[in-house]
Amino acid sequence: MQRPDMTGLSPEILAYIEALEAEIETLRSEGEDSRRAEAPLEPSEPPTTINIITVSAGGVAKRTPRHLYLRQRRGGMGVFDLDTPENDPPAFVVMADVAAGLILLTDQGRAFRLPVSEVPERDVRGRGESLLARFPMRPGERLAIVATDTPVDGGAFLLLVTERGQIRRIARQYVGPSLQPGTVLCDPRDGGAPAAACWSHGAGEVFIVTRSGLAIRFSERQVPVRGCLGLRVNPDDRVVAVAAPAADGGVFLLSQDGKGTVRLMPGFSANKSPGSGGKVAIKADVVVGAHVVDAQSDLFAISRLGKVIRFQVSEVPAKEGVVQGVNCMALRADDCVALTAGSVAPAA
C-alpha cells in the first residue's frame, strides 16, 4: 500500500500519522532484531546427563537435560520453560548432574536433600511437581535457596550467606546423602533468612552481592568455622548472591531488566577482611544473581513469566570497571529472576 497524498490534512493530524508510522517502523526493527537474536546456534552440545532444574517460588519443579536447550544470541527472548500458575512464578534455576542431589533450604534455615533423579523429567516446556510436599514443612515456611550437593564445576565448601550478610562455610560431607531432613544450617535470628549459596574450592575469593548492586570481595580463608559478618548491608538492601571466583577470574552479574556484565576481579579491589560495606559492582536498580564464569561458560537465565534463555558468556564484554551491562534477555512486561552457569565443552 502506497502512502496517499495528505496535503489537505491539518498539521495536527499529519503529525499524528507520522508518529504512528515512526512507531510501526520501530516495532518492525525490534522484531527483526529479535528474530536474529532468537536464531539458535547449532549445535549447542552433545547429549549430557547434566540437567537444568527450574523451580517456582512455591517449590514446583522439573528437570530437563541441558542439551535440549539450544543456544541463542545474547539479547534473545528465550523459550517458555516451567509452566506454573500466575501466583507461583519461577524463582530458581540450578544446573546439576542427574546423579547429584538437591539441597532445599527454607527461610527458617532448615535443609532438605532430594536426589536430582527424583525431580520429574519434562520437556523444555512442561509442568513440574511439588518438591516441598515430600517434606514436613512448618506453617508459613517457604523455599529460600535451591542448590546442588555435587557442583558441576567441583567444590569442597558450601558458602551460605544470609539476607543481612552473615556468611558460613559448610564442608561438603555435611550436606551430602547423610544430611538429615530438617537440619538447621543457619539460624534466621542471626542475620536473617538464608539468601544465597555457592560452592568454593576453599582457598579462593568470596564475592557477595546485594540487590542494589553493591558487593564486597575478600579471601575465603578469613571466614571462621562458626561464620562471621561478610558484608555490612544497608537497612533497605539485602544480599541476593554469593560467588567464589579466582583472584584473576570473573563473575557474571544479571539485573532484573535483563542486562548483564562480566565483572573481572582484578578491577574490583579486595578488602583485607570481611564485614565492611560494599562497593558498586554494577549500575542496576535490582540485581537478581551472580555466578562465576570462564571462557567456556554457558549462561541460563529465567524470567518471571517462565522463559529461559541460553547463551555463551563470550558474547558478554568483560569489564574491570563499573558498567550498566549489555542486553542479555529481551523482556516485555517481564523480569529476570535467577540465573545459573556452567562450562560446556565445544560440540564435535
Image (spheres, rainbow, N blue to C red):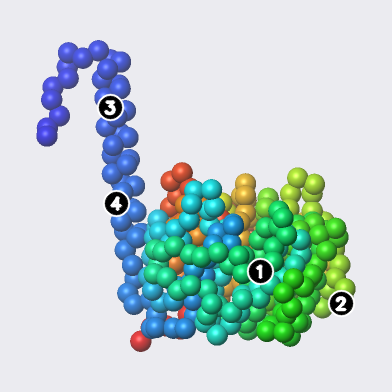
**Which image quarter is the C terminus in?**
bottom left
Q: CA distance from mark 1 to mark 3?
A: 61 Å
Answer few, some or many: residues within 10 Å of disc 2's Cα (few below 14, many 20 plus, some between 14 and 19). few
Q: Which mark is residue 18?
A: 3
* Residue 213 vertical placement versus 197 (above, below): above
Mark 2 or 1: in front is 1
Check whether the beta carbons of the residues at disc 4 and disc 2 lie within 8 A of each other.
no
Q: Earlier in the sequence, mark 3 or mark 2?
A: 3
Question: Looking at this view, is 227 or 2 the one in front?
Answer: 227
* Residue 331 vertical placement versus 296 (above, below): above
Please name the residue that numbered disc 1 is placed on. 135
**Which image quarter is the N terminus in?**
top left
Q: CA distance from mark 1 to mark 4?
A: 48 Å
Q: Earlier in the sequence, mark 4 or mark 3?
A: 3
Q: Earlier in the sequence, mark 4 or mark 2?
A: 4
Left or right of 31, for residue 74: right
Left or right of 181, for residue 146: left
Secondary structure, mark 3, is: helix
Counting from the top left corner in percent of width and height, residue 58 is at: 59, 57
Q: Quadrant of residue 115?
A: bottom right
* Residue 59 vertical placement versus 96 (above, below): above
Question: Looking at this view, is 160 or 279 the one in front?
Answer: 160
Left or right of 195, for residue 223: right
Q: CA distance from mark 4 to mark 2?
A: 54 Å
Please name the residue that numbered disc 4 is placed on. 32
Please name the residue that numbered disc 2 is placed on. 225
Q: Amino acid at mark 1?
A: Phe
Q: Quadrant of residue 337?
A: bottom right
Q: Earlier in the sequence, mark 1 or mark 3?
A: 3
Counting from the top left corner in percent of width and height, residue 202 is at: 75, 82
Q: Amino acid at mark 4?
A: Glu
